[in-house]
Image: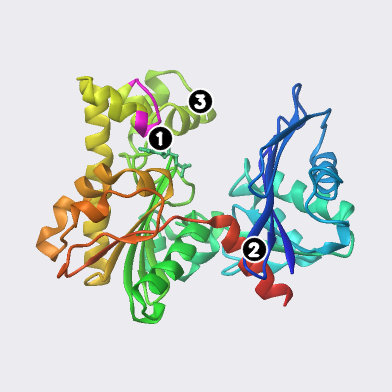
Amino acid sequence: MKILVVNCGSSSLKYQLFDMKNEDVLAKGLVERIGLEGAQLVHQPGQSDKVKIPAEISNHKIAIKMVIETLVDDSVGVISKMDEIQAVGHRVVHGGEEFSESVLINDKVMDAINKCIDLAPLHNPPNIMGIEACSEVLPGVEQVAVFDTAFHQTMPEKSFIYGLPYEAYEEHAIRRYGFHGTSHKFVTQQAAKLLNKNVEDLKLITCHLGNGASIAAIDGGQVVDTSMGLTPLEGLVMGTRCGDIDPAIVPFLMKKLDLDADGLNNYMNKKSGVMGISGVSSDFRDLEEASEKGNKRAALALDIFSHRVQKYIGSYAAVLNGVDAIVFTAGLGENSPETREQVLSSFTYLGVEVDKEKNNVRGKATDFSAEGSKVKTLLIPTNEELMIARDTKNLVG
Ligand code: AMP
């Protein structure tokens, strides 16, 4: 079965075509600058070189059409006809409380995704455009929605209700939803495989540490708490997002900086985090380099980042009443042995022992705990596209 996985942003469309027989990626690519000048499709068939195809791409429907034409193209294509695509899996950012798992898309599902626009005004609309474009270009092909929030829907009320009047939840759906759910679910399943255990028998803390970053406490395969909230702004200090702050800072800074709600939202989402603290970069590679050269604020940003990760891991170990494995994934989690070692240095009291040599690895599934460590420490590369393809395959049979 061949499955196309689509992830639409407001001006971009990422895709991967999977052959689910061996879960091989037949081709992948990106349409960028949709609706803008300088639009192009960057397509990579299998392991071959990327090809860049500039074009006028005014909307997502034209983008999808171009992707399909490229996939069946005589020279750079990987399938002979469009009918070979048996299903499409879409990443959808917000499923609210409607969706606790992936679903086959129909009119009712589309209505529900539309209702969640209020909760993710920047993300759900392009996701919807992608689904509508595929329905038009690939009529009759089944489509599946896979939500960033769905895996976290098992959280109990005590984890997801804020300390606000209960009416904020009842009347405005203000609660913690959590994000990166597809990644947390994928690494949970892979961690169980690596440990040769059933997911039901494991207490895990999964750390998705990339430009956006979140942590989840997972008991028997069910999320019991996670660090992101109503939006992806809560929790860890991230590349450019502030994470947890005293909420009183919001009205205070709005007055001081003369910013409206959108202005402050932008300040907290785009100008804060390790970028804002260091004044150097949101990229941890740049921060490590600057810190080594003696830049104090870059060093401080890295310290603050690790400190916040430690606080979440510590609190989740308490919430779970113990932990079998701590899992690291995403750009930084997969590629920075230094960050993993630094973060884990706070957990010797739990019996965590890292094997430094085994930890000296990037991007490869590895148990890097020392022999006899009471808690396993794992690097698991995430693969959200494959998780979407797997869910799609399960739903379309
Ligand atoms: P992601 O959002 O998962 O794509 O992660 C992107 C982030 O991972 C970048 O901002 C980098 O800070 C970080 N990253 C990627 N590779 C490395 C590396 N080799 N060392 C340190 N950080 C890295």
Figure quarter occupied by ligand 1 = top left
Frontmost of labels 2 and 1 is 2
Q: Considering the image in quadrants, where does the N terminus appear?
A: bottom right
What separation in Å lies between label 2 and label 1 (alpha carbons)?
28 Å
Give residue 327's quadrant in the image: bottom left
The answer to whether residue 262 is visible is yes
**Magenta stretch: residue 364 in it?**
no
Mark 3 or mark 2: name the one nearer the start of the chain: 3
Q: Main secondary structure of the magenta part?
A: loop
Give amino acid for label 1.
Gly
Q: Is residue 185 left or right of residue 5?
A: left
The numbered disc on residue 263 is 3
The residue positioned farthest toward the left in the image shown: 349
Mark 2 or mark 1: name the one nearer the start of the chain: 1
| Few, some or many residues within 10 Å of mark 1 (<14, 14–19, 20+) | many
What separation in Å lies between label 3 and label 1 (alpha carbons)?
18 Å
Q: Which residue is mark 1?
A: 239
**Magenta stretch: residue 283 in it?**
yes
Give amino acid for label 2.
Ala
Give residue 314's quadrant in the image: bottom left
Q: Considering the image in quadrants, where does the C terminus appear?
A: bottom right
Percent from the top left, x then y, of residue 265? Answer: 48, 32
Disc 2 on helix, strand or loop? helix
Disc 3 on helix, strand or loop? helix
Magenta segment: 279-285
Frontmost of labels 3 and 1 is 1
| Few, some or many residues within 10 Å of mark 2 (<14, 14–19, 20+) | many
Q: Which residue is mark 2?
A: 389
Percent from the top left, x then y, of residue 136? Answer: 88, 53
